[in-house]
Image (spheres, rainbow, N blue to C red):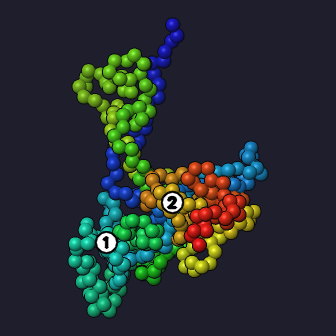
Amino acid sequence: MSHRKFRAPRHGSLGFLPRKRCCRQRGKVKSFPRDVPSARPHLTAFMGYKAGMTHVLREMDRPGSKSHKKEVVEAVTVLECPPMVVVGMVGYVETPRGLRTLSTIWATHLSNECKRRFYKNWYHSKKKAFTKYAKKMEANDEQALKAEMARIVKNCSIVRVLAHTQISKCKLRQKKAHIMEIQVNGGSVADKVHYARELFEKKIPVFSVFEENEMIDTIGVTKGHGYSGVTVRWGVRKLPRKTHKGLRKVACIGAWHPARVQFSVGRAGQHGYHHRTEINKKIYRIGKMSGQDKKTEDKTGTTEFDLTVKGITPLGGFPHYGEINEDWVMLKGCVVGVKKRVITLRKSLLPQVNQAAKEEIKLKFIDTSSKFGHGRFQTIDEKRRFMGVRATTTAAR
């Protein structure tokens, strides 16, 4: 009879406890990058909406790797990122018990998609949010605003701007914008406050925050799978086939004493819809489409080697999302969450020094074939040339 091991590494990480449903769908930034006063003031985060995945072809430039100077095909995720609008500023004081808010300054004019965030039921509300504040700011003729800014400069060490997404530009069903605090890094506190004040009621494009070939972090909520057993939730080994009363279980959930189940024992429960942060996602390309005339041809999917005039949207649109009409960001690999979910993008916390981070990406080909089934054509013109005149096309004309 063969010998069986009696010890093995545990199944499932305890670092992600408690495995329960997240209380908010927007990814929360719990740590911003360390401030460097010698740098110019800049923003450190952004928000976008997950559209879907495709694949790209490129030549790897990584000396020492077996794939050096060879073509590789890699999976990428596309996020639609309409420009964000800055609507406020928050000053924080460092205390022995953490950060404390000293003062919050809001812009005079807020859009309806931003105001919807402050209401549970917009339709039945009086829609009076910030009307008194706007009148007060106009009556004082910015004297109160300058006084609050001076108070922040004098007492605060951390300055963050309040910015919201323009969700109406993504053609989603939701009308309520997502709002978040974005930390301003670089320069003195006075420089930060002046920089934040200049951004009030202005639109910030994603290419002003991030650059191509930059390593960033993604924060979001994973896809929910409901109530799951221990085999899926913790990855424990299944019991033998003839086991009494089921085999997708934990055989022993603990000793007689202590007379309770330990927290570290895998149990059935919620699987998915957890808050997760993934680090070191490389930006392969940023598509600049905001402010363009709709009549102009979209060439954001064209590369130096593939001169076909095409956008990033595949034939038939991204499944469960649709077409991309705003700025977009292409990240290597996958990103947490389902389609249409808001994803928070943050600058990397650590300086990137490895070879993969420093590699300059030159795409040869971006796949835009249909994601419904096995796509054969990259553009609608290519499909029409191959298929010829069809009855549906003639009827449409």
310, 47: nearer the viewer: 310
- Residue furthest to the top: 1
Residue labelled with disc 2:
51
Pick whichever of labels 2 and 1 is earlier in the sequence: 2
Residue at 31% over, 66% down: 100
Q: Is residue 2 visible?
A: yes
Residue labelled with disc 1:
116
Quarter in which the C terminus is drawn: bottom right
Query: What percent of the width, then of the height, locates residue 256?
Result: 26, 21
Label 2 element class: strand
Q: Which mark is residue 36?
A: none
Q: How many marks?
A: 2
Q: As drawn, is 112 to the left or to the right of 338?
A: left
Residue at 27% over, 80% down: 130
Q: Residues within 10 Å of mark 2 (few under 14, many from 20)?
A: many
Query: What percent of the width, then of the height, locates residue 91?
Result: 36, 72
Q: The residue under label 1 is which amino acid type?
A: Arg
Marks 2 and 1, how far apart at CA = 23 Å
Q: Residue 88 lies in what quarter of the image?
A: bottom left
Query: What percent of the width, then of the height, locates residue 76?
Result: 59, 54
Residue at 35% over, 73% down: 114
